[in-house]
Amino acid sequence: MQIIYNSSTLTLEDMPLDVGYASERVTLKNNAGETFIIGGQNGATQLLISVPFIDDPLITQLRKIDTLLSLNALGGITQALIVANDKHELPALEEWLVGYDYDEAFGDYYGIRLSNKELAKSLFIISKDGAVFYHEILNDLNAPFSFDKALVKISAAQSCYTGKGCHG
């Protein structure tokens, strides 16, 4: 998959994890060097966003999704922002776990590591049973996420869980 950033073209090093497959639990580190786990089955719907850089338009997008989740009464969702390494300045976001992929497990398992070793701009929704319910991997790193579509998928992921998986 080719990814455009300004006038450069990057590629994904692997195939992204597809919808329906089990997600993997991976460990990230925050600014303080503390580890936390995302992915896998944890009993909550998870919204995992990876980015190659953090800028003001991204922070605005993340605040928009917070507002949309609140307005649609979609609580109890684990929200995580992931970057490739500790060279990035991690913002303090009230509703978000923010960390870096210190051992490269997230980028490798989810198949979103770019040829420049950063992470692609991606959004994964993991259902309560740990399956990838939806993903969006942007071809243009300057493009915004489709949060309206993601919101519909989050709502569906929240309501489909019966304790037997989304297909049971």
Image (cartoon, rainbow, N blue to C red):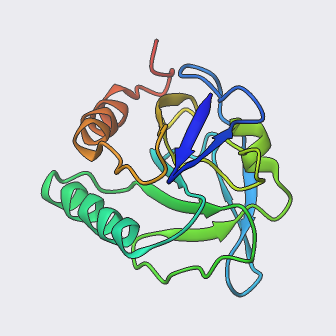
Q: Which residue is more in the foreground, 105 or 70?
A: 105
Q: Which residue is more in the foreground, 85 or 22?
A: 85
Q: Which residue is drawn at 37% across and 56% down?
A: 76
Q: Which residue lies furthest to the right in this view?
A: 103
Q: Which residue lies furthest to the top in this view?
A: 168
The picture places residue 137, in percent across and down from the top left corner, at 50, 37
Tell me if residue 55 comes above or below residue 135 in the rendering.
below
Image quadrant of residue 97? Answer: bottom right
Judge left or right: residue 117 versus residue 95.
right
Image quadrant of residue 55? Answer: bottom left
Q: Residue at x 74, y 51 (%)?
A: 26
Q: Which residue lies furthest to the front in this view?
A: 7
Q: Which residue is more in the foreground, 142 or 144?
A: 142
- Viewport quadrant of the N terminus: top right
Tell me if residue 7 comes above or below residue 162 in the rendering.
below
Q: Which residue is more in the foreground, 121 or 68?
A: 121
Q: Residue at x 49, y 50 (%)?
A: 141
The picture places residue 25, in percent across and down from the top left corner, at 72, 46
Q: How many labels does the image show?
A: 0
The picture places residue 13, in percent across and down from the top left corner, at 77, 35
Tell me if residue 54 comes above or below residue 61 in the rendering.
below
Q: Which residue is drawn at 86% across and 59% down?
A: 103
Q: Residue furthest left?
A: 71
The picture places residue 52, in percent across and down from the top left corner, at 60, 59
